Image (cartoon, rainbow, N blue to C red):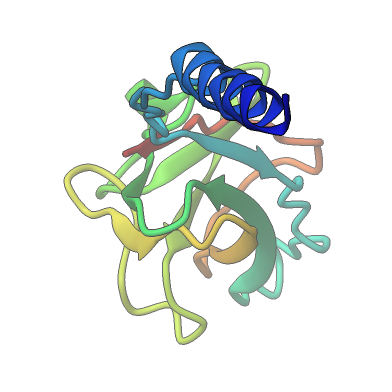
Amino acid sequence: MKKMLRVALAAALLAAGAHAAALTVTTTFPVSATVAASCQVTATALAFPNYDAIAGAAVDGQSALTVTCTKASPYTIALDAGANSALATAGARAMVSGANHLDYNLFSDVGRTTLWGGATTVAGTGTGLAQTVNVYGRIPAGQNVPALTYNDTVTVTVNF
């Protein structure tokens, strides 16, 4: 009887082991994702201090662009000629008030030596965090204009 119990127990264990192996199966599957490059840009107003047409001295101002691009994504920032480009003289931009205009320039450097516009862009590489890029403006000296408030709108384009 003991022998029969041992044989039955061995058969049961063997069957249980075979049964457990038959119920276990594995596989793998691939996982992937694509991160698309993207950028966002905002800008502060460039509000020049008062321009004294009598004294005729140049006046400087500054704006800040905030560019946020995907980490390691190269980008360039372009500034258009402004909404009043047809009125500008000598490569400058123009702010207008009625039929009057006041010329100004935008630069990419604090020394105001590198004009920013046309084919001239500013390049950068995204960090995934907000990056500040300054725009430096100057109203050139010697403009004989009426005492009015002058305005323009410049479009910022980030290519990435």
The relative height of residue 72 versus residue 113 in the rendered view (above or below) is above
Residue 157 drawn at (x, y percent): 42, 33
Residue at 42% x, 34% y is: 35
**Residue located 71% across and 35% down the image:** 150
In the image, 102 versus 72, the foreground residue is 72
Task: Tell me which residue sits at (62%, 31%) in the image.
Answer: 3
Viewer-proximal residue, 37 or 88?
37
Q: In which quarter of the image is the N terminus?
A: top right
- x, y (%) of residue 17? 54, 26
Decide if residue 130 is on the left or right side of residue 136.
right
Judging depth in this view, the residue of 5 and 116 nearest the camera is 5
Quadrant where the image shows the C terminus = top left
Out of 36 and 62, give the one closest to the viewer: 36
Asked if 67 appears above or below 15 in the picture, the reply is: below
Q: Residue placed at 57% from the left, 55% from the top? A: 128
- x, y (%) of residue 4? 64, 22
Q: In this rendering, would 59 be left or right of 49?
A: left
